[in-house]
Image: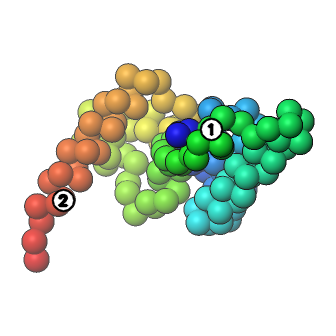
Amino acid sequence: MGHIIGIIEKAIDGGYGIYSKDIKGLVGYGLSEAEARQNFIENVEEQAEYYNEKNGKYPEWYQKGYTIEYKYDLSGFFLTFPFIDATKLARYIGINPSLMRRYKSGLIAGEKQKDLIQTKINEIIENMSRVKF
């Protein structure tokens, strides 16, 4: 089975863009995240059709079936969750708030930095899951 990772990011016009490093040229766009995901899925199908027309067969990932996993870059994360304050999150994580604001604006974080942020967000999710009202 093929596994496609779609990376959700903030588009230049404020909407959502999704791209994949797994399939060259595969992108999606929408004014909402749902629109972008739908467009991305449509484009996966179009990529498979194009491959079939060009090569006389569908790509292996398509023949065996595929799954799509969506991940956020930090600009997409803050677009989807605008109520999260980048400065306060940075302080909680222990990184420079101005750096986090640049990530929010589209600067790409390195792997080590993304791992740190992911670990701390997982910690927040774990703590929030224990909240009862």
Badge 2 marks a residue whose secondary structure is helix
Give the residue number, with chain letter if any, for mark 2. Answer: 128
Residue 72 x/y as whole percent: 49, 46
Say whether residue 47 is left or right of residue 56.
Answer: left
Residue type at mark 1 is Trp
Q: Residue at x 25, y 45 (%)?
A: 122
Residue type at mark 2 is Met
Q: Is residue 78 visible?
A: yes
Badge 1 marks a residue whose secondary structure is helix
Residue ranking furthest to the bottom: 133
State which quarter of the image contains the C terminus.
Answer: bottom left
Packing grade of label 2 (10 A; few <14, some 14-19, many >=20) is few
Along the line of sight, which residue is nearer the eye, 83 or 124?
A: 124
Residue 110 x/y as whole percent: 47, 24
Along the line of sight, which residue is nearer the eye, 25 or 121?
A: 25
Q: Residue at x 86, y 33 (%)?
A: 55
Query: How far apart are labels 2 and 1 at the CA level?
Result: 37 Å
Q: Which mark is residue 61?
A: 1
Residue 94 x/y as whole percent: 26, 33
Q: Which mark is first along the chain, 1 or 2?
A: 1
Q: Which mark is residue 44?
A: none
Q: Is residue 106 visible?
A: no
Packing grade of label 1 (10 A; few <14, some 14-19, many >=20) is some
Residue 67 x/y as whole percent: 52, 48
Q: Residue at x 38, y 38 (%)?
A: 97
Along the line of sight, which residue is nearer the eye, 77 or 23?
A: 23
Q: Residue at x 82, y 41 (%)?
A: 52
Identify the coloring.
rainbow
Say whether residue 26 is left or right of residue 122.
Answer: right
Dot in front, 2 or 1 = 1
| Quarter holding residue 2 | top right
